[in-house]
Amino acid sequence: MWEIDRSYYVEFEETFQRLFDKKQMLDQGRPLPQSALQKIKESLTIEWTYNSNSIEGNTLSLRETQLVLQEGITIKGKSLREHFEVKNHEVAIAYLYSIVHDSYQLKSRDILTLHANVLRSIEEEFAGRLRNGGVRISGANFIPPNALKVPTLIDELIAFVHNNPLGLNTIELATIFHHKFVWIHPFFDGNGRTVRLVMNLLLMQAGFPPAIILKNDRKKYYEALNQANNGNYQKLILLMCQAVERTLNIYLNAFPGQEPYESIATIVSEPGTPYGQDYISLLARQGKIDAYKEGRNWFTTRQAIQDYIDNRQRKRQL
Ligand SMILES: Nc1ncnc2c1ncn2[C@@H]1O[C@H](COP(=O)(O)OP(=O)(O)O)[C@@H](O)[C@H]1O
Ligand SMILES: [Mg+2]
């Protein structure tokens, strides 16, 4: 259970390095003006709530989620339950922010509290309680372990995070945690929303901003989890790196003097671009250059492409 195939590592070495560099840039650049930070935090809270609930089946749009949270508006035609899901998730995030700090150590009690926040007033009988019976995950390639094993497995998972016996970096650790947690599937419901909160607890206590798994990536996310069930973490690591980088960029872009991100189509339309659109898009999808996806388009910077070229040249010379 606790042996991890890390063959993904070679492929992601440079990506990890880039993300840690960006985190360092963020650390050095702090503090951002309080008002800017507050704005980003609020918009991330809305995005995080929308995406995590939406993956789980909530039908409120991003805009409606914002209206519920910021204006206290009730959306016509949407159930009370869906409104609770939105408000509960915001409360859970607030709780998370209240406990996270540099030397925070993950505790099972906090996981249960986050879960209780997620299901409050919706499924009270399950809120904050480990399951005491079997579950199935639709579309999954396995059946979660027997309920009797859940408490021990969760304790082992928490110990794995604390001891980090394989010396995983924070992003790997959050990814493996994410997968093992939903594999154990400790709750009757709310596992997905809870794990996406707890994985961010791990990232944030290490100084990263929260990563948001996007609703648009739901299919990829489920595929990645199925592959992880078979011991292959490649896809899930990629998805996590993309999510982490997206939020890092949001913070970094708040600093004055950042080079603007442009769509790859725009960049290749200018003379002197060394690669074509297909190749740069491939590098972007594989996480090999600094890039992010918004809607259907990939955005990157000229500098990111130049960095990639320089890096390759350096490697060839070695
Ligand atoms: N094939 C899979 N293998 C492991 N976990 C999965 C798989 N498919 C989905 N999951 C996880 O299960 C979650 C759904 O479980 P559920 O308890 O209904 O959580 P929620 O109610 O928050 O959506 C998904 O968000 C995902 O994290
Ligand atoms: Mg559910």
Image: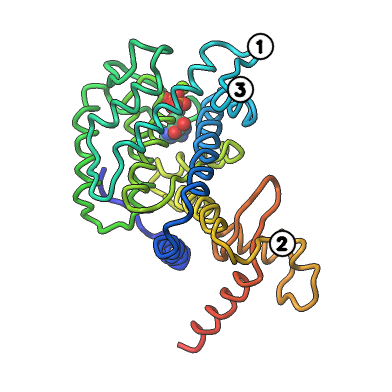
**Badge 3 amino acid:** Thr
Instruction: Look at the image and tell me in which quarter the N terminus lies.
Output: top left
Q: Nearer the viewer, residue 200 or 70?
A: 70
Sequence-wise first label, 2 or 3:
3
Report how many numbered discs are placed on residues in the image.
Answer: 3
Instruction: Look at the image and tell me in which quarter the C terminus lies.
Output: bottom left
Q: CA distance from mark 1 to mark 2?
A: 40 Å
Sequence-wise first label, 1 or 2:
1
Label 3 SS: loop
Ligand 1 shows up in the quarter that is top left
Q: Is residue 231 above or below residue 308?
A: above
Q: Residue at x 50, y 42 (%)?
A: 212
The residue that mark 3 highlights is: 59
Q: Nearer the viewer, residue 164 or 98?
A: 98
Badge 1 vs badge 3, beta-carbon distance below 8 Å: no
Q: Residue at x 47, y 65 (%)?
A: 18
Residue 77's disc number: 1
Residue 264's disc number: 2
Residue 236 spot, x, y in % from top left: 46, 47
Sequence-wise first label, 1 or 3:
3
Residue 177 spot, x, y in % from top left: 33, 43
Label 2 SS: helix
Task: Point out the frontmost of discs 1 and 3.
Answer: 1
**Badge 1 amino acid:** Gly
| Callout 1 crowding tier (Cα within 10 Å): few <14, some 14–19, many ≥20 | few
Q: Nearer the viewer, residue 42 or 48?
A: 42
Quarter of the image holding residue 283? bottom right
